[in-house]
């Protein structure tokens, strides 16, 4: 499967990305590496995933709607989405582009 994980560099997201990769999926990780806590920890979280050719990091804010729209235009259909961070982007895009509604 191809799976989008938002907030994918965080505590939960990075473990989830690892698990999804280990299960053979392609993972698109979106994270803006905000400074709520040390962003370097988030980079360390992804150190292993970044070596995997099925892992794609989008270092962008999930609220950047033009960038998100562009992503969906290029990566749907058959895309599952896990929104650990999302705010209104979830409402706007999930039903339109994600297979898991
Ligand atoms: N950890 C827990 O025990 C727990 C419990 C209940 C719910 N949650 C929820 O699960 C989610 C993930 O938790 P976590 O512990 O992994 O948090 P975390 O802070 O470690 O990870 C969140 C990630 O989202 C990224 N992020 C935040 N806003 C973003 C934006 N606008 N665009 C792109 N990326 C953005 C951050 O940079 C961070 O890497 C959160 O919504 C949290 O509220 C966590």
Image (cartoon, rainbow, N blue to C red):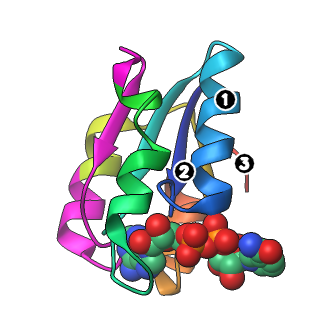
Name the residue that disc number 1 marks.
20
Name the residue that disc number 3 marks.
100
Q: Report x, y in % for residue 12.
A: 68, 58
Front residue (pair 46, 3) = 46
Name the residue that disc number 2 marks.
5
Front residue (pair 35, 60) = 35
Q: Are marks 3 and 2 in contact (CB under 8 Å)?
A: no
User: Could you tell whether 94 is left or right of 16 in the image?
Assistant: left
Q: Report x, y in % for residue 82.
A: 64, 54
Q: Is mark 1 within 8 Å of ligand 1?
A: no
Q: Which residues are magenta?
A: 51-70
Q: Report x, y in % for residue 37.
A: 44, 81
Q: How many marks?
A: 3
Mark 3 falls on what kind of element?
A: loop
Q: Are marks 2 and 1 in contact (CB under 8 Å)?
A: yes
> Which quadrant, please, contains the N terminus?
top right
The residue at the point 50 percent across, 86 percent down is: 88
Q: Quadrant of ligand 1?
A: bottom right
Report the mark closest to the observer, 3 or 2.
2
Q: Are marks 1 and 3 in contact (CB under 8 Å)?
A: no
- Does 57 appear in magenta? yes
Real-space Cα separation, disc 2 to disc 1, in angstroms? 10 Å
Rate crowding at label 3 as few (under 14), some (14 to 19) or many (20 or more) other CA atoms within 10 Å: few
The residue at the point 34 percent across, 33 percent down is: 56
Real-space Cα separation, disc 3 to disc 2, in angstroms? 13 Å
Which callout, 1 or 3, points at the residue further toward the start of the chain? 1
């Amino acid at each position: 499967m191809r799976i989008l994980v938002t907030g994918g560099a965080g505590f939960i997201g990075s473990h989830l990305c690892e698990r999804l990769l280990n299960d053979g999926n392609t993972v698109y990780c979106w994270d803006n590496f905000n400074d709520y806590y040390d962003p370097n920890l988030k980079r360390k979280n992804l150190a292993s995933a970044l070596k995997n050719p099925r892992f794609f990091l989008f270092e962008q804010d999930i609220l950047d709607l033009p960038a998100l729209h562009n992503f969906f235009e290029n990566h749907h259909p058959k895309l599952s989405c896990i929104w650990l961070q999302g705010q209104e982007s979830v409402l706007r895009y999930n039903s339109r582009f994600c297979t898991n509604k």
